[in-house]
Structures are given as structure tokens and as C-alpha cells.
Image (cartoon, rainbow, N blue to C red):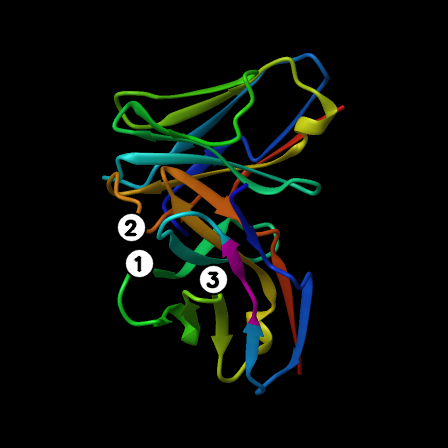
Amino acid sequence: AQSVAQPEDQVNVAEGNPLTVKCTYSVSGNPYLFWYVQYPNRGLQFLLKYITGDNLVKGSYGFEAEFNKSQTSFHLKKPSALVSDSALYFCAAYNFNKFYFGSGTKLNVKP
Amino acid sequence: DSGVTQTPKHLITATGQRVTLRCSPRSGDLSVYWYQQSLDQGLQFLIQYYNGEERAKGNILERFSAQQFPDLHSELNLSSLELGDSALYFCASSGGDSRQETQYFGPGTRLLVL
């Protein structure tokens, strides 16, 4: 079965420290990969996407993601976390006309 | 503000009933996507319409149906509602049909089935 996994339900990091939110996928072919963020009582907001090309993708709000084909991973990263980054993050894959979402990772950035 | 609007914001109904959720895409966007977000199932893709035609289908139950009208707004119809249908329903829109397109999400409709 096709799926996207986010192995951590929650990630805690101190403000100013680097953060990583992990994502691995099991989707056949060469899926497009996405990261979305969801703030409380809000819809999802697009952060970045990988289609092809450079394995390091830069996105909104200083986030970037690293695509690793051999490990089928697409981890979200940020060099210096902000308290305002605290939210729910979703990884998604798109292939063959279907979207597959991970279960979400709650990021807590403490001052 | 993404430019995508959804009505109503909240909906409370009883089991066995039927409801209609409405989505207006961003101006100029031709694709509309519907998603269901629930505690136990997470975020699931339901269906996509492009310029009035069904384009892709995900985990949408037979009790659910959708359509996109000539003015490009979309409606998601949920019938014979069950307790498990309680969830947040999002729609999103994008400019075209390509899977490369960035999707812009609406604020969601929170459905509670009692």
C-alpha cells in the first residue's frame, strides 16, 4: 500500500536551535513531495515541494527540505527555529492522481 | 487569507442526515480538491475536480459525492451520515490540473455528527 510516514508525533526544540521534521514515503514511481503547515483552527498552508532536480528545496518562512531517493525520505529542516514555527506539519506525496498524507508532526518551539 | 472560502464554518447534524459543504476557489483557479481530516484517519484526499470534471479520486466513500459547477465553485455532499464522519473538511484550489501546482487551502468546515 502506498503511504507516507512521519515517525514522530511531536518534536520539541528550543528557539534558535536547528529543527528537523522527518518524513519517509512508500509511493511507487517518482512522486512529487510536499510539506504543509497547519496552525490552530486554520487550513493547511503550502511550505515547499520537490518535483525534480536539486535535492535541497527551499521554501517559505526559511524552511527547506532534503530529498533522498535512496532512503525515500523528504525531511523538513530549518537552521534556526522560531516560537512562531510551532504548528502541525504534514508531509505529502502525489502520484498517479492521488495524494497521500502523513499523520502529521506537532512542532513545539520553546523560548 | 488563501482566497479560498468554505461555508459553513461549523455544522452539527444527526446520524442518517445529509449535508452539503460549499467551496469557492481562488479567483481564476480551475481545480478544486476536497480533503477530510479526522482524529483517527488523519488527513485524507477525497476527490479533485478540474473545470467541472472529476479528475482524481481518493478515499471517498460511496455515501459522499461532489461536483463542480460552471462558476467553478464546488459542493461536497455527505449522506447517510455516521458518527465517524465527524471531521474537518477542507477544500483547496489550484490554477491548473498539473500535479505540480501549489494548492491553497480554505479554512475548513467542521462537521459534528451526533
Along the line of sight, the residue nearer the viewer: A57 or B72 = A57
Q: Is residue A54 above or below residue B73?
A: below
Give neighbour class at mark 2: few <14, some 14-19, many 20+ (Cα, 10 Å). Answer: some
Residue B108 belongs to magenta span: no
Judging from the image, mark 2 belongs to the subunit labelled B
Residue A16: x and y, percent? 57, 87
Q: Chain of mark 3?
A: A
Q: What's the residue at 26%, 43% (across, down)?
A: B98
Magenta residues, start to end: A21-25
**Residue found farthest to the bottom:** A16
Which residue lies most toward the front here?
Answer: A70
Q: Which numbered mark, 1 or 2, is in the foreground of this view? A: 1
The residue to which callout 1 is attached is: A51
Amino acid carrying mark 1 in the image:
Ile
| Labels 3 and 2 share a subunit | no
Q: Quadrant of residue A65?
A: bottom left
Q: At label 3, which amino acid type do we have?
A: Thr
**Who's the residue at 39% across and 42% down the image?**
B4
Question: Disc 2 on helix, strand or loop?
Answer: loop
Q: What numbered label is drawn on residue A72?
A: 3
Give the mark, 3 or 1, whose residue is nearer the N terminus: 1
Q: Secondary structure at mark 1?
A: loop
**Marks 1 and 2, Cα distance to the nearest angstrom?**
7 Å
Q: CA distance from mark 3 to mark 1?
A: 14 Å
Q: Where in the figure is residue B40, as x and y percent of width and height?
A: 70, 41
